[in-house]
Image (spheres, rainbow, N blue to C red):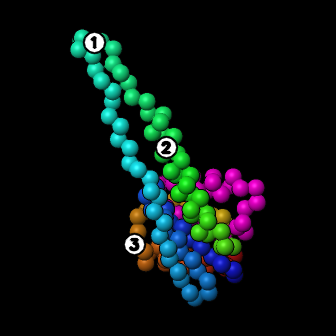
Amino acid sequence: MGNQTGVWLDSRIAQVITLNGEQVTTQEILSGREDFHPKGGAGSKTPWGPQDSLDEQKYMEREKHQLQNYFQNIIECVKEADNLYIFGPAEAKIGLEKAIESYKHSPFKSLTVETSDQMTLNQKIAKVKAFFSQTEKH
């Protein structure tokens, strides 16, 4: 059976649910990601004149680094797991999967990624238990 871990995440928060026999432990990891809402440059006094543009590349690069740190924190938290189940509503789960796959030697025996909706902590725990009980049957 081994150590089974489920991770529900979006771009703001991850909830790590670890099943070890009948014992269930949960942990929250905050992304620390800032919400960037850059305002566009300055206009010219002349009608239809040139405008200063805002360089969004700087904001995009900063957000990319924040998400990479977020994924590294999650991986550090779940590295003891034998089986990993990742689920959540946003694209962050795909980013985490890619971050895990970028390792040369993945520490996980199995890795499953699935889309799910927002849910309460108890619903997340039930979903992780149901997933791993279903995989044990096969």
Label 1 secondary element: loop
* Residue 73 falls in image quadrant: bottom right
* Residue 93 falls in image quadrant: bottom right
Report, in whole angstroms, how far the alpha carbon at label 1 lies from the one at label 2.
32 Å
Return the x and y of residue 92 as percentages of the image width and height. Answer: 51, 54
Identify the amino acid type marked 3: Thr
Residue 28 highlighted magenta (yes or no): no
- Disc 1 residue crowd, few under 14, some 14–19, many 20+, Cα 10 Å: few
Q: Which residues are magenta?
A: 83-109
Q: Quadrant of the C terminus?
A: bottom right
Q: Circle 1 sits on which residue? A: 48
Label 2 secondary element: helix
Q: Quadrant of the N terminus?
A: bottom right
49 or 10, which is in the foreground?
49
- Disc 3 residue crowd, few under 14, some 14–19, many 20+, Cα 10 Å: few
Return the x and y of residue 29 as percentages of the image width and height. Answer: 48, 66
Give the residue displayed 38% in from the left and 24% down from the top: 53
Give the numbered dot on residue 62.
Answer: 2
10 or 118, which is in the foreground?
10
90 or 72, which is in the foreground?
72
Identify the amino acid type marked 2: Arg
Q: Is residue 131 above or below residue 72?
A: below
Sequence-wise, the earlier of marks 1 and 2 is 1
- Disc 2 residue crowd, few under 14, some 14–19, many 20+, Cα 10 Å: some
Residue 91 highlighted magenta (yes or no): yes
Single out the residue that lies furthest toward the right: 105
Label 3 secondary element: loop
Q: Are marks 1 and 2 in contact (CB under 8 Å)?
A: no
Q: Are marks 3 and 2 in contact (CB under 8 Å)?
A: no
Q: Tell me if I can see residue 134 in this picture.
A: no
Q: Circle 3 sits on which residue? A: 120
Report, in whole angstroms, how far the alpha carbon at label 3 lies from the one at label 2.
31 Å
